[in-house]
Every structure is written in structure tokens, then in C-alpha cells.
Amino acid sequence: MPEGLGGVAVTGIGVISAAGAGVAALASVQRQAKGLAVEGACEALDTGLELPVCHVDNDFLEDECMELACGRFPNRTCALLFRASVDALRMAGITTFSSIQGIRVGISVGTTVGATFNNESCYFDWKDNGRIDLEYIYQFHESNLALWLHSVLGTSGPSVVVANACSSGTDAIGIAYQWIRDGRCDMAVAGGADELSRIALNGFNSLQLTSSEPAMPFDVNRNGLNLGEGAGVLVLEDKDRVNIRNVSPVAFVLGYGASSDAWHPTAPEPEGRGLQSALKDALREAHLTPSCISVINAHGTGTRANDAAEARAISAVFKDVRPPVYSIKGLLGHTLGAAGGIEAVSLIQTLKDRMVLGTPGCREPEYEDIAIASEGWEKEISGPIGISQSLAFGGGNSALVIEGC
Amino acid sequence: MMSECLLIGRAIVSGGEWLEQVKTTRVGLRRADMLTAAAVLAAERASVLIDNDEGFDFSGCGIFVGLGTGPLNQNFEFLESVRANGEGQGSPTLFAHSVHNTLGGYISRLLGITGPCFTMTSFVWPFLSALQEAFWFIRSGRLKSALVISAEETAPMLECAKSGIDRHKRICSAIAWCLSGVSGHDRRIALIEDVSVAERPCLGEQLFFRSGERWSYPETAGANDGINDYAMALNQFISGVVDGVCDSRSWRLSGPFGNAVVRLRDLQCR
């Protein structure tokens, strides 16, 4: 097996998104697509807002692997998480849940919508008529993603649900990476999951962050984001355990950094100083310099403020190294708490293929100081190590340094 | 080599109407909701007595927030603003405060903390879940200091579901602990020897009514009286344990939803 640089092994990855289920589907659609994987699907949310969203085809949530959960899905986010987790575990050689029920399995999941009570009919029935269906209340209490996944896998070990808004998925992987390093569990299932929500769509719309057109990350004409849904999951293991199990890692997480802007409730610090700090911390933990990085999966939402702050941060940290920078939000939409998980999977696939694909929607890159991989790009990358980074409401920033195998 | 994890500051804030009044005069909190205001005030009070020269370094500090229902009321208010005004006309201020990590963002901004900020949700023991992660960040040397906060606000819909009575008065409670990894800190209240939380899947009904929840430490034992306040009930317990005790204490919590143990050593009388 590859030695890696001393990080935590990734032995499985799983993803479900508007591009479909599975890593191969994501790569295939990313290679072919020039815009949103699914467009103009507001009917899915029963909303009058004419905004494009990227939703997951229900067929992917009804196949044979979903039967393993015995129909126990308190909400759609749980179903998305389960689908990606089963794929990741299978890639890691875990074909029956019973095979991991005797070890310490940590579950760390990032989400936003998945931690919120969004049952509108229940709320308004109480508000208008004083009636409460307790089943909805119980269901809400059973929807903690990490505990729910423990219950269907039959596993035990540390559990956490990270609700750090848009950086939740990246932070959840960062926490699980530290669990493995600290010896708190033998294996961890980590990533992010989120479903589309009419409330979240109205919320982003109220902040004037949505675009009525497909998003154009880093493009000079970008004017907002599109929402999406999905899940992205990594199986993390200590390297010694990987040797004992005789499985081949697909990647190694080498470092993780996180920071706060301490700036504004919803807008990023314009110079991206917080992100710079997170990037430097992640590189320091990995014992690497910026010149070791061959590709960056950016947060790249397509909003004016995010992309500007992110570009300035990348420029400040990487200066003349100029690794290619790409975003997949023009393809899958912004999947909120799932984004960090899905994008970590995308980065691992990019590192595996040694090929970076362009940013759907970015036809005329705005920033010259960084090497934005624009739409249609398909270039070999120079090395095996990349970064996946996220920014969030509340001023959160986080970055993962990952080595592909 | 593991670092020591010291408890060096703590505060509890609870109340209702007075928090609304504080919000109107306190710089930076005018637009905040009550839950956020309570959390910010608890974080400030826990850290204000600590002289930075003694080692509590805000620049190297992380924030760990544990929430149960979190900003549930703000989420409902945003929903109502959409219903009242129509789609596309929801209040941006309400939406911004309906996101779980809003109060962590406020604390970071108003206290000038630029380290990592984690918001974690759990219906079991959210404060202890956040404390456990902060404990490990300190012990492993990743952070020199940490603020651990938990805040909860009664939600009229959940209150009604539990008791059948409409109580529109909302009450907030927040707890904050300051942790330091600097050995020999002058302001140490106690050495935190261990924080171990093992959550277990259970029925939503058991979590909602807290049925079967028990806690104990040497002198007393108690049970949750069924109030839907994951942080609030625990706040009283934690406060009682730390105050006026001068040696070591081990608290144990249990229920159908898990077990937890917190061990403190070398408690200083204050």
C-alpha cells in the first residue's frame, strides 16, 4: 500500500448528488457537463420561487441498498446520508454492517437543514388550530444524523453532528480525522448531508444570494448561487488498521485547519484573512508548504462576496505557486452542509485521475492572480496533493489537505 | 505528550425579559435574538474575569457550541414571515438568526476570537458533547484555550406538545466554560481529568420527555423533571457540583439515550 505522508487513511468514498449516485457518476457528469446537473426544478419544493435547484432523483433513493436501513428514514437527509455511507463502506470493503459492530466506529456528519425542524404543516397546524401531532416531534428528535446512522449500522463509538452552516461537511471530516489521530475510534464515517428545503431557499433568496440563472463561480458575470442537495462521505481509518485489514486506501487526510473571521454575521471578511489562517494551519499540520499543493477544490459558490474573498485568500497564501482552482457548485448547486463532504470526494477523484476538470459556469474568470480552471478545462495536475476548502455563514473557514493514491 | 485541561472560568445566564432589554443597549446585539444574546453574555462573563496575561489567549482560542433545539423559534419566525409576506419576502434578519452557528459567529465577532468555531447539535447532552470535543482539542495541544457554550430557549410549540398548555413566554439559558491548556494557571477552578459522553440511539419520545434520565455525584442525585431544556436542567446540576467543593468529583449521567462521565480534580474553593 502507498505510505502516504503520515496522515489518516481514506479507505472508502461515497457520494450522491444531482449528478446521480456514486463516484463514477459524479466524475462522468463533471466531465461532460457545462452547467447544472438538474435545472429549474422548483416543483420539487412546492415553491413559487422561480429559481433553479439541483435535486437528487428519487430513483437513487429507492434502490436495493436503501433496503438495508429497513425503511427507517426520519427525513430525506438521512436517506441521502445512508446512500452515500453505504457506497463508501462498500468501497472500504465493509459489505456487511455486522463486520464493524465489534469495533469503535465514529460518526461525524455535517448538516444544516438536516438539524432543523422544517415541518411547516406541523407548525402551522399548531399555530392555527392548536393541534400537534406528536409523531412529528418524536421524528425530529430521532433525526440526529450521527445517532441515526449508528442505529441503522448497529455500531457504537463517538458521534457528532456539526452544524457549521456551509463548512459543516469539511469540519465534520476534520473532527473525525482528529478522532482517528487521537485514538478515539478505529474507523470513522464522516462527511456531510443535506436535503433541499423551501425554507432555506426562501432564506438565501431573502439575503439576495440566489441567482435565477445557473451559478457561475469565479466568473466576471456571476450573480449568485443555486441550492442543491446530496451527501458525500469518507471512511477514515488509522494506517495500522488498514494494514491489518489489508485494504488499499484511496487517499490520506494529511491536515486540517479551521478559523473564524470575527467579521460579519453572513458576509466573509473581504480579504479572506480567516481562510488564509485555516489554509496555513492545515498546511502546517500536514508539514507541507504551498508549493506541495497541486489543485484546490474551492468553495466557489458563485456569489460576488464569497468568490472574491476566496480568490484573495488563495492568492495571498499560494502567491506564485498558482495551483489550479476549481468549483463544482455550477454543476451540483450549493449543497450546504453536504458541500464539504461532496467536494472532498470530488477532490479525491481528481487526485486519483491526476486530472483537474474545469468549473462549470465559469467562462470568463475574473481573477488573474489565481489559476482558475474555467469551464471545459481538462489538464493533468503536477502532484498527488490537493486542498478542499469551505467558507460559512457566521465567518467560519476550514480546509483539508488530502493526498491521493 | 498530552496537555492538561483546566477549567478557569464559568458563567450561567438565564432569564427572559431582561435579556430583551440588554439587547437594546448592548453594542452588537441589537438585532440578535434572545438565544444568541444569552450565549454571548455567558461567554463574556465566563472570560471577563480572566487576565489575559495569565494565559487565556483569545487569539489561540476555539469556540465549541452545543445546541439541542437551538434557534428553533427563529426558524419558526422566519417561516411566519414567509407566510405573512409571501414567498420571496421573508425577513433576511430572521433567516440569518435561524441558522445554528449564528451564535458562535456572534461570540467570535464580539469577543474577537479568530480560532475555530464548532457548533454541534445533540438532543442528549449538548453541553457535554461540546465540552468533550473542546477537552480533546486542549489535551492534544491543538488549542491553548477554548470557550465551551451551550444555550437553549423554550419553544412554545414544544412546551405545548409536552404539557398541553400554551406558554408563549420564552425563557433562555446559557452556560459557558473557559478552558486552558496552560499548566499552573493562576485562575484554575479545577483540572478536568476526563469527559466521556457515549450517546445511544433511542426513541424520540424518550428524548423528548427525558424519561429515565438520571444524574449523580457523591452527595446528591437527581432526575430530570421533564422540562424541555437540555442545557437548562444540566446547568443547575453543573453549577451545584462545582460550587463549594474542594476536592475531586465525578459526575455520572445516564438515560436510555446514553451515559456520560465528567471527572474533575483539585477543585479550588472560591
Image: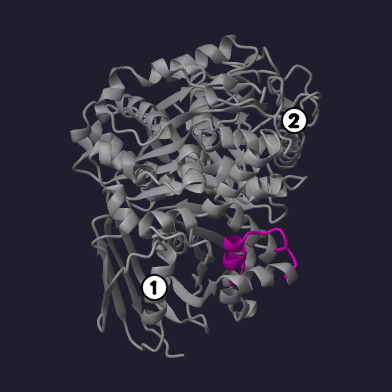
Q: Residue at x 44, y 20 (%)?
A: A23
- Up/down of A223 relative to B51, above or below: above
Q: Residue at x 37, y 53 (%)?
A: A182
Q: Amino acid at mark 2?
A: Ile
- Up/down of A147 relative to A352, above or below: below
Q: Are marks 2 and 1 in contact (CB under 8 Å)?
A: no
Q: Amino acid at mark 1?
A: Ile
Q: Quadrant of residue A379?
A: top right
Q: Secondary structure at mark 1?
A: strand
A334 and A132: which is toward the camera: A132
Q: Nearer the viewer, mark 2 or mark 1?
A: 1
Q: Secondary structure at mark 2?
A: loop
Whole-number angstrom distance, CA of label 2 to CA of label 1: 46 Å
Rendered location of residue A103, percent (x, y):
22, 44
- Up/down of A63 relative to B20, above or below: above
Instruction: Please report the bounds of the magenta region as a residue range.
Output: B26-41
Looking at the image, which residue sits at the far front?
Answer: A129
Q: Residue at x 18, y 34 (%)?
A: A98
Number of numbered tags placed on the structure image: 2
Q: Is residue B226 left or right of residue B142?
A: left
Chain name for mark 1: B
Label 2 neighbourhood size at 10 Å, few (<14), some (14-19), many (20+)?
many
Whether residue B217 appears in magenta in the rendering, the answer is no
Q: Which mark is residue B192?
A: 1
Rendered location of residue B249, percent (x, y):
31, 79
Chain name for mark 2: A
Q: Quadrant of residue B68?
A: bottom left
Q: Are marks 2 and 1 on the same chain?
A: no
Residue A387 can be seen, yes or no: no
Q: Which mark is residue A159?
A: none
Rendered location of residue B217, percent (x, y):
27, 77
Q: Which residue is mark 2?
A: A370
